[in-house]
Amino acid sequence: MSPWTWQWKVWNQMTRVHTAAYRASHGHIGGSFRGAPVLLLHHTGRRSGRERVIPLLYLADGDDVVVVASKGGSHKHPAWFVNLREMPETVIELGSEKRRVKVEVAPEAKRRELWPRVVELYGDYANYQQRTEREIPLVILSPAA
């Protein structure tokens, strides 16, 4: 989906509404999607320098959380993922709690371990992987010191 299409504009508006509802309700509204938990991920545009926030499904893995850079099976990585690759740390919101986290793309062995768990969490991830030739990255967000 091109960023200039009407669908993209609608998606961006829905994301803003979701984020506002999530924050206003401390995650009670918009805090889950089809049974999977949702967090708000902060990232800074690598070209614009603007702070952005996006709701994403996540998998809890001990003290870490794992997010999936699927972009619905697009052949391109989502912008938030490209932005995070240049950020050693960021902030996530889990309900009313804000956490500073370290950013790490899961190494291959860890990805193999986590992939079945994220697919169990949200089955469409398997369909998304089938739609694209790129390996969908998993991003591990660990508590920052």
Image: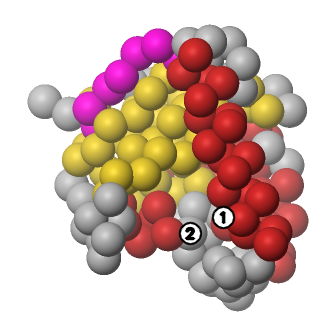
User: Would you call the spot at circle 2 few (<14 residues within 10 Å), some (14-19), or many (20 or more)?
Assistant: some
Under mark 2, the amino acid is: Pro
Reply above or below: 121 against 50. above
Tell me the residue at 47%/61% (across/down). 80
Judging depth in this view, the residue of 43 and 70 nearest the camera is 43
Asked whether, in this view, residue 144 is left or right of residue 20, the answer is left
Residue 66 showing in the rendered view: yes
* SS category of the residue bearing label 1: loop
Under mark 1, the amino acid is: Ser
Residue 29: x and y, percent?
72, 18
Q: Are marks 2 and 1 in contact (CB under 8 Å)?
A: yes
Reply above or below: 48 against 100. below
Which residue matches tag 1?
70
Tell me the residue at 77%/59% (across/down). 10
Tell me the residue at 75%/38% (across/down). 121
Asked whether, in this view, residue 116 is left or right of residue 82, the answer is right
Quadrant of the image occupied by residue 135: bottom right
Which residue matches tag 2?
78
Spatial separation of the CA atoms under disc 2 and disc 1: 7 Å
Question: Which disc is residue 111 wearing?
Answer: none
* SS category of the residue bearing label 2: loop
The magenta stretch spans residue 66: no
Q: Magenta span: helix, strand or loop, mainly?
A: strand
Quadrant of the image occupied by residue 137: bottom right
